[in-house]
Amino acid sequence: MTKEEANIREEVLLISGCDVSRCMKCGKCSASCPAYDEFDIKPHQFASYIARGDMNALMQSKTIWNCLGCFACVERCPRDVRPGRLIDGVRQAAMRRRGGSHLQPEDIPSRIDPDTPQQLLMSVLRRERK
Amino acid sequence: MDLTYSYFPGCTLKTKARDLDVYTRKTAAALGADLVEIENWQCCGGVYPLGSDEVGNKLSSVRALNDAKEHGRDLVTVCSGCFHVLKRVNDDMKNVPDIRDRANRYAQLAEPYQGETRVLHYLEVLRDAVGFDTIRKKTLHPLTGHRIGAYYGCLLLRPSAILEFDDPEDPSVIEEFLEAVGATPVKYQMRNECCGGYRSLEEPAFTNRLVGKIFADAKASGCQELVTACPLCFYNLQKYDGPDKLRVRYISEVLAQALGIDERGEVR
Amino acid sequence: MQRIGVFVCHCGSNIAATVDVAAVAEAAKNQPGVVFATDYTYMCSENGQNLIADTIREYGLTAVVVCSCSPRMHEATFRKVAQKAGLNPYMVEIANIREQCSWVHKDKEIGTPKAISLMKTAVAKVNLNVPLQEGESAVTKRALIIGGGIAGIQTALDIADAGYKVDIVEKSPSIGGRMSQLDKTFPTLDCSSCILTPKMTEVAQHENITLYTYSEVENVSGFVGDFTVEIRRKARYVHEDICTGCGLCMTKCPSKKAKNEFNRGLNTRTAIYTPFAQAIPNVPVIDTEACIHFRTGKCGLCAKNCAVQAIDYEQKDEIITQKYGAIVVATGFDLIDLKPFGEYAYNLSPDVVSSLELERILNAAGPTSGHLQRMSDHRQPKEMVFIQCVGSRCEDDRRGKPYCSKICCMYTAKQAMLIKDHYPDVNIHVFYIDVRTPGKAFDEFYRRAVEDYGVDYIKGQVGKVTPQADGTLLVHGVDLLDQKVVEINADMVVLAAAVEPNPDIRKLATMLTLSIDNNNFLNEAHPKLRPVEAATAGVFMSGVVQGPRDIPETVAQAGAAAIKVVGLLAKDKLKTNPCVAYVDELYCNGCSACQNVCPYGAISYTQKEIRDHGVREMRRVAQVNPALCKGCGACSVACPSGAMNLKGFSNRQIMAEVDTILCQ
């Protein structure tokens, strides 16, 4: 773990408020995840990646942008690890660091249609733009 | 019982989900509940800011919550997204001293806000204050024979420890509501699975797949149509392009139909 | 003034590493009343004990302070030493400088002054100690067993075989418990009822055992050796002494729709019923909620058909009062409620069953006569999924329990093999977190399921079970080792639900003043060294009421509890604790505050003539029954006038300790 990774880890633990040592690797989170196949690093792996300090891999993973934020993993985790908050913590750390955003403003107009609800646009803006 | 509430419509209900707003107000009035819209409310932000150090994005919710407190009323909303954000921010203000202190320093309210307001979803008002029995009695056009499935999605239910809305794995409040308006509620197992949410902007093919599974289960279980309380779910379900697609409506529209209320609030 | 000796123990390096023991002894020499002080490596050793005894004699000590480990460890040891040397054993005080000092501090800078402070408080207290005398109480030579499962049955048999009278109180209409619901037992696959029913019969026929089935403990008073217990014998509406067990009443009963509890609600039974064919006693009971006669006043077919007129609709509950010397709690367990686990569709589909429901389905006396069938359409399943740890190892207390239920890994392997034995074409998949099989021939048993029977064990969990239009159940899970989603169209899903102590234990624990943990399991007097004794003297425990365990462990523990009971009943008299409450009647204003807080009902009131400053008057004053008092001290705290005191822990003694700490 590099010094930078140690910093990121500390930040993620703070942002998420989670205790990764509670994870018992049961896989309930991954089994509950509707986006499992869209993830390169799976929900149940987040706790051990963070415990090890393997933060660069997490920061570059597709997972942090593909997570739906549906909280199924948070709801069903038998150990109160709340993997969804860990994933979100890494996403925020990535955004704050990169100083950039996942989705660029110019990408958006082509993707919306007359029915697109404000709720959708706000959610995307809040989650993916600094 | 005093049925006056502070009402937080939310952005989407002012634009794309006007039906949800209009029918909520009209049905509430018909059932003797007074929804007083909060003045100068601001967007809740659409998603609850998960970061334990985030305060700024929660302030619009705090202002709405505080406004309800100053009027001595419960805060009602019907959009699942707003309900989720407002209720979780309220929980922060009640139970997380760090967020409470910092939010109050920013917000500069007459008195510090400490989570005093009760946040209610319109369904909770219907169930607990109006009563499903009253709805049953006031139903002029029962939806007899309609086999309707409730689509709950995520935002109303999870995390249940904070939202305390219903059993997160086997919810029943919408089914009870449907039963009250004379419909035949159909429970199907996927009703609390995610529709894909905001990912539909970037990955419509992916959210289409998720919605497809939900429709397939609903249809196989015998649903003829679905109802929801979430504009984002509504949008994703509507956009679905596949074999098992069912009609989707907002809960308030179904209620209006049962009570015989049209868009102008007149009873037909 | 006392002549006090202070003895400071090193406990090897346990104390000496973080406390300057010589400095403690040196400081003791300046304390009021202290005429001797020293330190020694192991005060509990024979040499250490001799040191204390010799010093008592040589210096004519009237009181002793030992600075050592917790009084729970060696207070009894040192009291015996004092007694042998001619001192009243209650003139010994322990200063706990190990658990409360050396073990919790890292260096002598903090440890030594704290140890000195603890020593001073003990000296201050012992200066006010007075000799106390132990009393004696008689032992009632009869034991009560609460719960008639295998734990209670075995305990009762072992005590009865030793020659003592035993009563079993069982809530349900028959003894047998959970074990009677099991089909086979692991790892030997004996038929459960084949090995249980002989024991049940032995209980019924044993001259020393009295059976109270369909009965509950209503109230308990008294203390070790002399408990008084009220037992409610619920009205059976069938006279046990008349009924011949012919069963005609059950065949004639037209009300057949009551939920069959014995089969976990998978089928129905009649309103007059015995839970199962081998029930002991073989006497039915009437379920008044289901009985047509009780609901409408009509029917009466059972009474009309009973050849011996055993049926009595007018029967009332009966309370019997009995004295016991010892009580064994063996109330067993149930599975947790599976309703909050909606993701497994337990509420939605009858083909999702608990492990105990499957046990009934596999049993020849069960709802399907032992044929493996789906409860929905009675088809034989081809694909089966078992989900482990449902509610076990779960920190979410709205759904589950934080502990491992211990028996599930083994019974799942058992159920899988039993099914494969009879239906080799069934495919079985087991989703597990860890497979835990410590025990004699246990891991071999599980490996047999994998290697010989081809049971498919998948490391991972299930997120959702979704009933399909074709009647199958789509099981969506992950295989963590393959890192892949697994979807199985199963015909049946079996949930290995967590075990939990029978909820009745809470009420019972209050009656018996037992301590229970966060999960409602009974706490032992000492988790390692007194594993079958409850913290309340004279109360013992057996079976899952103490923690998850399997049948052989339960039987072993039952034997251990029995020998403890026999050891108690073998005595004619017991020594009683002299540290009980007493009243200074002059100060008592009769306010009842002490009576209200006393958990043991040891305080009553009497009118008594009191002389106060030469004035004689009748006053209402408290009086303590020393036989009932446990010396908890609640009364002495509650008393507003300082009239209540605890022998050995008087208000003056406690205040002297506090003063010593505050005045440093």
Image (cartoon, grey):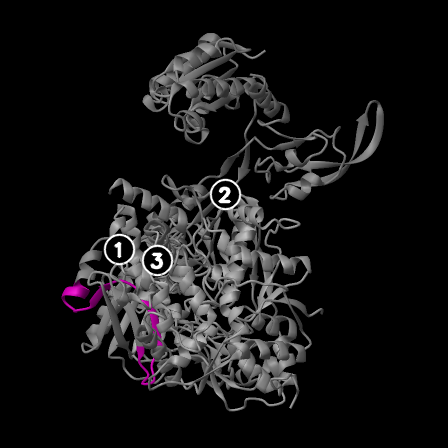
Q: Which of marks 3 and 1 is nearer the N terminus?
A: 1
Label 1 to label 2: alpha-carbon separation: 60 Å
Relative to residue A119, is residue C453 drawn left or right?
left
Which residue corresponds to mark 2?
Answer: C536
Answer whether labels 3 and 1 touch (C-beta < 8 Å). no
Question: Can residue C271 be found in the magenta stretch?
Answer: no
Q: Classify B80 as above or below C581.
A: below
- Give the image location of residue C219, x and y in percent: 58, 54
Relative to residue C318, is residue C486 drawn left or right?
left
Label 3 to label 1: alpha-carbon separation: 13 Å
Between C368 and B90, the residue placed more toward the observer is: B90
**Are there few (<14), some (14-19), or many (20+) residues within 10 Å of tag 3?**
some
Q: Which of marks 3 and 1 is in front?
A: 3
Image quarter for residue C354?
Answer: bottom left
Q: In the rendered structure, which amino acid carries the disc numbered 1?
A: Gln
Q: Which part of the image, by quadrant, shows the N terminus of chain C?
A: top right
- Give the image location of residue C256, x and y in percent: 48, 83
Q: Nearer the viewer, mark 1 or mark 2?
A: 1
Q: Give the range drawn in magenta.
A: C448-473
Query: Could you tell me if residue C269 is visible in this image?
Result: yes
Q: For the residues tagged 1 and 2, is the chain the same?
A: no
Which residue corresponds to mark 1?
Answer: A60
Q: Disc 2 is attached to a residue of which chain?
A: C
Image quarter for residue A1?
Answer: top left
Between C67 and C647, the residue placed more toward the observer is: C67
Q: Classify C5 as above or below B212.
A: above
